Image: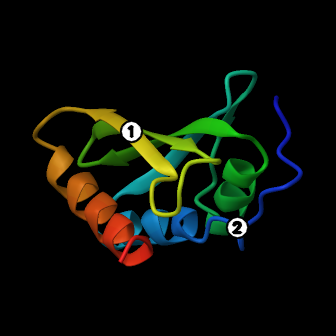
Amino acid sequence: MKLNKYMNHKTYPEVRECLEKLIDRGWSLIGYDDGDEYLVLTGDLDEIVEAVHSVLECAVEIEKDSKFADLFFVLGNEPGVALSDYSCSSLLSNDIDEVSEEIYNKYNN
């Protein structure tokens, strides 16, 4: 694990906002992968946000209606683009696209 001692929830508040908005849209946060370890998440948002901020890049696995997606976070990008990419079926991408755009517009206007 590449520890990221310079980043915290205040450095990239959009990480929490992004995850909260997806939870509000019915997504569940189920896994975290930093390349060295995979954690099954309990749904505790603080735990997830802390885990994302502990490394420079990671993936968070999410689920909605028994379908899965991966969110790729990269800390070190410009504000509003900590969510750098995602992978899922095109049928699920609307929620993620909308949340990503909301976050980007908030931090880049």
- Compared with 67, 79 (above or below) is below
Which amino acid lies under the numbered mark 2 shown in the image of this protein?
Answer: Thr
- Compared with 86, 42 (above or below) is below
In the rendering, which numbered label is found on residue 34? none
Residue 107: give x, y in percent of width and height: 44, 73
47 left or right of 89 in image? right
State the residue at coordinates (56%, 68%): 16
The quadrant of the picture occupied by the C terminus is: bottom left
Quarter where residue 8 is shown: bottom right
Q: CA distance from mark 1 to mark 2?
A: 19 Å
Which amino acid lies under the numbered mark 1 shown in the image of this protein?
Answer: Asp
Residue 61: give x, y in percent of width and height: 47, 39
- Callout 2: SS: loop
- Label 1, on which residue? 85
55 left or right of 60 in image? right
State the residue at coordinates (79%, 48%): 54
106 left or right of 42 in image? left
Within-10-Å neighbours for mark 1: few <14, some 14–19, many 20+: some
In the rendering, which numbered label is found on residue 11? 2
Residue 103: give x, y in percent of width and height: 38, 68
Residue 89: give x, y in percent of width and height: 18, 32
State the residue at coordinates (36%, 38%): 86
Quarter where residue 37 is shown: top right
Q: Are marks 1 and 2 in contact (CB under 8 Å)?
A: no
**In-front residue for pair 44/108:** 108
Furthest-top residue in this view: 36
